[in-house]
Image (tube, rainbow, N blue to C red):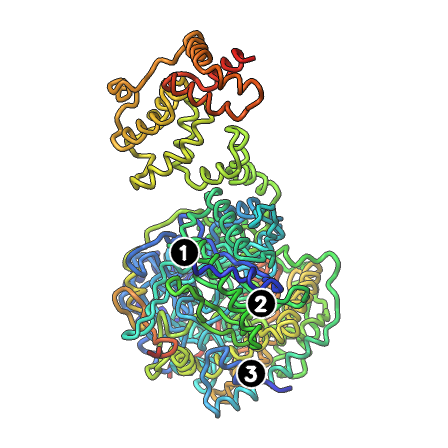
Amino acid sequence: MSSIQFLNLKEIKELLKNNNISYKELHSETVNLFKKYNEKLNCALEIFEDSFIENSIPFIVKDVISQKNRKLSAGSKILSNFISPYDATVIERLNFFNYYSIGRANCDQFGMGSSGENSAFGPSINPWNLNKVPGGSSSGSASAVAAGLVPFSLGAETGGSVRQPACLCGIVGLKTTYGSISRNGAIAYASSIDQIGIFTRNIRDCAEIYFSIAGFDKKDSTTIQNFKSYSKEEIDNFCNQLNNFSCKGKKIGVIENAINAKDINLEVKKKLEEALNVYSKLGAEIEYVSMPTMEYSAAVYFVISRAEVASNLSRYDGVKYGYRSKHSDNLLNMYSNTRNEGFGDVAKNRIILGNYVLSSEYTDKYYIKAKEVQALMKDEFFNNLKKFDVLFLPTFSDIAFDIGEFSKNSIAIDLGDYFTAAANLVGIPGISIPCGFVKNLPVGFQLLGKMLGEKDLFNFGHAYEQATEWHKHKPSAFMI
Amino acid sequence: MSISIKKIANMSRINLTPMQEIQSHEKLEEMILYINIINSVDKKLSQDFDLNIYKNRNIFRKDISFNLDTKVNSTIKKNAPEFLENLFVVPLLVKREK
Amino acid sequence: MSNDKKRLLSLEKYTDYEAVIGSEVHIQLKTNTKIFCDCKNEQCDIPNTNICPVCCGYPGTLPLFNKKVMEFAIMAGLATNCTINKNNYFARKHYFYPDLPKGYQITQSDQPICIDGFIEINDEKGNPKKIRIQRIHMEEDAGKNIHSDKYGSLVDYNRAGTPLLELVTYPDMSNQYDVRAYLKELHSILVATGITTGNMDEGSFRSDTNISVRKKGDTKLGTKCELKNINSFKFIHDATDYEIGRQIELIESGEKVIQQTRLWDAKSHETFMMRTKEGVDDYRYFADPDLPLLIIEDALIESIRNKMPKLPRQIKNDLITKYQLSEYEVEILYDNSDLLWFFEETYFKIKSKLVISWVLRELVAAIKEFKVEIKNYIFTPNHLFDLLSLLNENKISQKIAKDIFDICFASGKNVLEYANKNNLISVPLNNDEIKNIVIKFINENKVTIDEYKSGKIKLRGFIIGELMKKTKGKANPSLINTIFDELTK
């Protein structure tokens, strides 16, 4: 039996179909891969050896997504021993399409972080270079897919937590249209902008998984009402049509102020321009466009996400489940000690900022104002997406940085959300696609699409992939 | 700008040590300084822009009850940090006098 | 009642003061399920039975809004003359308490579903008065905390997430009578719509009363205190009176009223402090991003309006017109549906003025004495019908009717059989027979009759009385009168 490592979905299905491998063998091989490499990568918090489902293919799930009768830690101490009694809608949908979860992927706690270093269970590692972070917060999900241990994984995004680690790990990362994938079962960070995301090693796999899980869910009232979920046939049809797409005459808007951002790594910028050249050669019309509201995206994102996370994390109080501080003689102490001991520094600081901007004294100045600027951003993005099929910009300003390079609390690392947060605030889909290497570390570019314009992103992404070889590169650092 | 970090930490039910208080305060001030840029925005929305177009409306659940899987109920009870005779237990708000 | 002695009537004592009173009422809605999950909405003896991941605030769960709650809220709004807000959204109200699973309550803040309504009451002098409703909003209830010195606080989430409406008035009430009248009227309206059981002992109708006092002529409001958790109209009435007095006396003695929440001790007949309200809590409201907008179309409002049952005021007015009753009589019947049933059943058979007076006097007294549930009792509307028929046809006297009533009410015996057996029924005298008796009387009492004829009108009472005696109650009194007048013209 040949190794299943680095095989994509289509290849695995082919092997299974031709009986080159059995489902049972696929399962044990996957378990073995994690056993072999997780010590180095720390990408999985737990591997479910008992999770095998007949006729199904394994994947791994960021540990903020609920899996029935499994632990759900959110990468935190406060939920370290919590057992979830139900499956998230995405898990049910994937089971329906013959995929099953084989474990829980490490992540920055409650999705807060851009490096994977904010996990209560230690940082995940970038398979391309063991001294580097994989990005975050969906660090383990990205690391596992980049290392070829599973064909795909689920992450979750609030401000870039799928696209940014995908970019740093050299894989495809999709943030979907707000309301296209049910959030039922996904631990809330900022409910109004949270979306579950997908990691794969190529566009086709990404499309296949996206169509499997997308669609209205009666358990999430924020999923788009008239957006029906897809059938197996519709999914296959779309995936098979990817090759028929042509960029000819299609319009790509390059966000000028983003690609020329002053802190961008110039070698990264060069790779992005090369990617644009590829599109140009494919016949796409490239036009530069200035989008001034981008400049506020990080600030607006800070205010809205912190406000909502302060609210959403209120439920972790040591009363009903999770960690409770032992040394508390009254209720107030129990709350305050539990939350001080149970949350990491980043979570605590974000809660504090959130409650600050929501407090009656400041809510108009910050929270309400941020909602207004968010509306302006939507206005500008929707207008530009009427003119262009997709928008092009960097995913991240740099390549993966060293573990421990930034203090977890520095604003510099928070500002890394600059390129990604806009899509979350506006609600549009965004995808990060690998486009080369700088210092042997991956670089990616980002495409943004219209509301429910995921198909455009897949078409453009697939066209690029067909014209380049970047997605075929495999990391080897972690295998030595 | 003077921020009562104590007051916000208390509102957040987070018991910061004096050291943490200083760090949190610094971080908060740094962030506030940054987010203040949104207050320099005085642009207006284009006239035809309706914020609510992309918001769902009137999604309802029917008023029909379901019996929950007893296993779910028992998991909920097992997750409790302290549980006694079908009740969640927490310390008293204050020790009662008399 | 001993409480009457303790009655304070504070405002009558301190006539230069006035009270300003507003009310907040929480009502539990009679839905099948909770407001945001499909757990059963019912009282349950075993704690933490009707719970699920959603109402326990589990990670990753989302609220799913129960349509019935909106319909019930609209009904409450229409029943209290409110305007229904077209654009609704839910907000999060943040505070930490063990009975609040998510650390926030989902409620409505600046755009409640109903606004600007009113309820009509009668004040203590019987004059109509409007109490304006400021708002009605939908929200989820919290669970229950039980405090135990031995174990700590014990939390039950059966009630967590059950639907509530909160109804807030403007401070339009000025004394304890207004408060009681308002609450009773509101209660009967809401119960009539069928959206709540109104059971006050089970907490289905929970009233908080905000009271402040000031010198008449002052324009500034005084510091208010809130009376909480009082579950009877009478107690609320008494507590309001007491609280008005307490506040006036504080001011009179040069002290200040401190804003606080107070409870009522029915035994000592006093209010006492539960907690002071130091500063204002910062609830950090914002629109709940998990719930979609709620847009209420006119068509929906109209369809609910068409389905609305009759409201108390309309029912009462209908009763007044239909049976020609007084407002007072209707009040009593309306408050006691069994009595109303008995009345209507009897009246249906014999359309006589006698029915209402017998129901309100003899029947009410007998029910009280025998402590019976009249709807399932041996004495039925048929019994009363038989009895009143005899009375109406002058076959028995008032006195005999009362005797028969007493026996039959206690025993359930058939009225006609009993009266016949005991020879209580007399065939009434006809005109000629009465005439003969009257002529005989006139002839035997010439002096008296002459005096009467010459203008001593006072004698009439005596004469008719004597005639009644002579006819042994077998003559219709009005017939006697008519015949006597004819013969003495």
The reply, left or right, for residue A249 in relation to residue C89 is right
Q: Nearer the viewer, residue A417 or C37?
A: C37
Q: Secondary structure at mark 2?
A: helix
Q: Secondary structure at mark 1?
A: loop
Task: Report the amino acid beneath label 1.
Answer: Gly
Per the image, the residue denoted by label 3 is A413
Task: Report the mark closest to the observer, 1 or 2.
Answer: 1
The reply, left or right, for residue C336 in relation to residue A252 is left
Tell me the subunit letter for badge 3: A
CA–CA distance between discs 1 and 3? 52 Å
**Disc number for residue A424:** 2
Q: Nearer the viewer, residue B42 or A174?
A: B42
Residue A258, image quadrant: bottom right
The reply, left or right, for residue A93 in relation to residue A359 is left
**Quarter of the image with the C terminus of chain A in it:** bottom left
**Quarter of the image with the N terminus of chain A in it:** bottom left
Q: Does residue C404 appear in this view?
A: yes
Query: Where does the image place residue B65, in percent across and percent down from the top left?
Result: 37, 49
Tell me the subunit letter for badge 2: A
Per the image, the residue denoted by label 1 is C203
Task: Report the mark closest to the observer, 1 or 3.
Answer: 1
